Image (cartoon, helix red, strand yellow):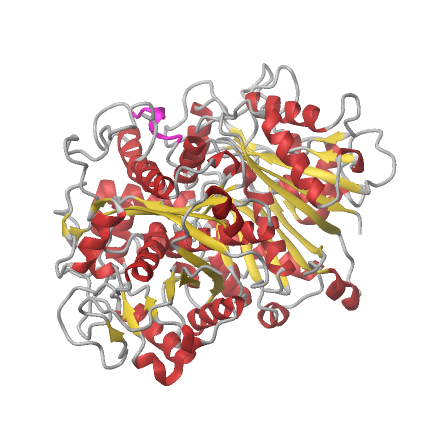
Amino acid sequence: MSGGERIVVTGLGAVTGWGVGVDELWEGLLSPQPAIRPVVRFDTTQHRTRLGSEVPPPEGTPSDPRGRVDGFERHLRLSLSDRFALLATRQAVAQAGFPDTRRAGVFFGSSTGGMLESEDFYARLCGVIPGRAPLSWIPSQQYNGPGDAVARELEATGPVTTLSSACTSGALSIADALDSLRSGEIDLAVAGGSDSLCQLTYAGFNSLRAVDLAPSRPFREDRAGLTLGEGAGAVVLETLSSARKRGATPLAELLAGASTCDAHHMTAPSPQGAGAAAAIRRALSEATLQPEQVDFVSAHGTGTPLNDAAEWQALAAVFGERAADLPVTSVKGSIGHLLGAAGAVEAVVTVRCLLEGVIHPTPGDGDVDPEAPVHLVRRPESPQRLQVGLSLNLAFGGSNAALLFRRWSPP
Amino acid sequence: MSRESVVVTGLGTILGCGPGRTALAEALASGRPHLAAVDTSSGYHLPGGPRLASLAHHVDLSPWLPPRAARRLSQPSKFAVAAARMALEGAVLTADDVAEQGTAVVLATAFGTARFAEALIRDILTQGPEAASPFHFSESVANAPAAQVAIALGAHGANVAVTQREAGPILAVAAGAREIELGRSRLALVGATDEINPLVHAILGRFRALAMPDAAGHEQGRPFDPERNGFHAAEGSTVLVLEGERSARLRGVEVLARVRSSVRAFDPTAPPHDWGHGAETLADRLRAQLQRDGLEAKDFDLVVSGASGSRRGDALESDVLNHFFAAGRIPPIATPKSVVGEYGGGALAAAILALSGEGLPPGFGGRPRRLLTSALAAGGASAWLVLESP
């Protein structure tokens, strides 16, 4: 698989609790404070927790983020998740130099699609809240809403596939795009993930007692759960020959995308992190890399006791004694867990780390868990060598995904 | 790198017509769908609208899924686990084989575990968020059926849920075949699983997507009929066992079909809830992608069409076929969705049976050598699969 054409990243886009933009996200990640605040999207007084990382509405727009957003007036049927996907895609396509996307494939992941709008529809349908339940709220409320919306806007005619494998959806979609590019099916792809915060996931994760009352503290000894977030991440991927032909500047190389399944439990990772370790090994094999060539890990790092422990076990199994020295970071202490978008946003951040030569910190106080003794990046780090980054995601149902990116070096 | 040839060696179906290949073949031969009344007591349905669907929740799954295990699963997960076990039986494979072969699981679902998701939202809205059931939540994710198949059978390969509406089943087959072609897995369990709960049925009805009752109260999708007015919704699961052809031949197992090629495309003229008019674009891409695999229109002797009775969907399908095949040279077309309905992967199963000479259009002599099966989704995604007689 490594013998095929090199696949490069030429555009990045992100919508997160830090706002719309990769620069905004990067600056936020470098700050010691998280973008975690009391949720305003819906009433949380009856919920067990109050915090989340919501995307702030762009300046000058109505405070209701479901209201019109600049440039979306003609897309009244778009869900918030669709809008996040479009905003992230527009950035990525712009950075890539506006390639002709009509030949592109679109690969997007989403965990809940337009569930936020479905909840409003259902509440009205059942008379829980007054008002008509307009059918116009429904069309974009499917899992495939964000990816289809992106494909329509780009006028894409290539393959369009939505994957919904909970928290690995975004990473699996990037891996799907990589396969498609390597096979020669297409030479240009937009891939990513998008999800908006909704009551179903907010109450659902609380029902599992998987949400921390405070901002999540990945890999800390006293961690008590995740914080939910929302947003989207998007990357433009293309064959190196396509990028050269267009005169586009590669930002990084996507070396591998691998996935496995724990086949163990719906919500708990396999205790030894065996499935995640297998995904990392597959990715390394696909990229023909040795473990010692990986310079840092963007961990799934949710802050739940089980996830972080399993992830450490996986890293220890693959990287051996070096695992304790391998820099590990997690965006989730800053922007929360973006579910179906998590893998996509974390891929964007992994590439940005390689571009900057800096690994962003994981905010939060407390000592690192001695049972999961990762080298947690707590302040921005600039190691001498920062060539290869591993982005890892674990999901409900035991799905694991590992992406490997390499700092761009022309052949 | 030469690609491993991928074949289908197992077929499991839990559909409204009953479990298994024989029930499906009999239904296709009869030309009649197995429709049952959808529960309308929730009040979601509009007066005078569709009331029937091909429902499978009455099917006895106990030969493949012990009731004790079924208690912990949503309906789509139950369908999928049962269909997967049935498919493995047909392929003469055991759960040990699945565990040893790094098996991939790729299942499509259009609406996910709709009943559990609805129950969860209803509880949150009416009783408060603390009433949310952790069981409903963990099974509400779209990948729950694929994950439950993996857990039940010990499948440690890629585990993916494809959520691309009507195109999902073919996309799932293509994704599973790729895992084998690239040497990542030696086995793949691929297909679709869906449930039609009253809410999903009512919403499809409100969108006028479903076949309306005629004067006699019949509701059936009538593909390509000028008077068609929608499809009939179906629930259930179809799971195929995919493996490398060399491995299948060595095992001496019956090969049901060879997966020769797959094509994906998008019609950007499609609105989110309906089909578009980009037939020429879709046909051009179909032609170009098949050429990469050394195929052209004249190489097909049957089309197993995804036409369902949808007004705009069938029109687009017809236009694509007319663009792709030279005028007057369209091979015979089978339209299994008039029997199996939309969703649940019944049409995919029918395409496999067609290679054995079952469910073929009237007058079709012998067995098809190579067929093209299609799935154009509302919203624009489109997929085709080329299946060959082994």
Residue located at (50% from left, 58% from top)? B159
Q: Is residue B84 left or right of residue A196?
A: right
Q: Is residue A375 left or right of residue B135?
A: left
Q: Is residue A22 or residue B175 the one in the foreground?
A: A22
Q: Is residue A320 above or below residue B352?
A: below
Q: Is residue B86 or residue A108 the one in the foreground?
A: A108
Q: Is residue B187 above or below residue B227?
A: below
Q: Is residue A65 left or right of residue B154?
A: left
Q: Is residue B131 visible?
A: no
Residue A138 in the magenta stretch? The answer is yes
Q: Is residue B334 left or right of residue A56?
A: right
Residue B337 pos. (x, y %)? 64, 33
Q: Is residue A48 or residue A282 the one in the foreground?
A: A282
Residue located at (68% from left, 25% from top)? B323
Residue A213 pos. (x, y %)? 15, 60
Residue at the far right in the pictured view: B365
Q: Is residue A317 above or below residue B284?
A: below
Residue at the far bottom in the pictured view: A321
Q: Where does the magenta region start and end? A: A133-139
Residue B58 pos. (x, y %)? 55, 45
Residue A223 in the magenta stretch? The answer is no
Quarter holding residue B248: bottom right
Q: How many circles with numbers are drawn on the protein?
A: 0
Q: Is residue A312 or residue A8 the one in the foreground?
A: A8
Quarter holding residue A254: bottom left
Residue located at (74% from left, 60% from top)? B245
Residue located at (39% from left, 75% from top)? A314
Screen quadrant of the N terminus of chain B: bottom right
Residue A4 pos. (x, y %)? 58, 58
Q: Is residue B74 visible?
A: yes
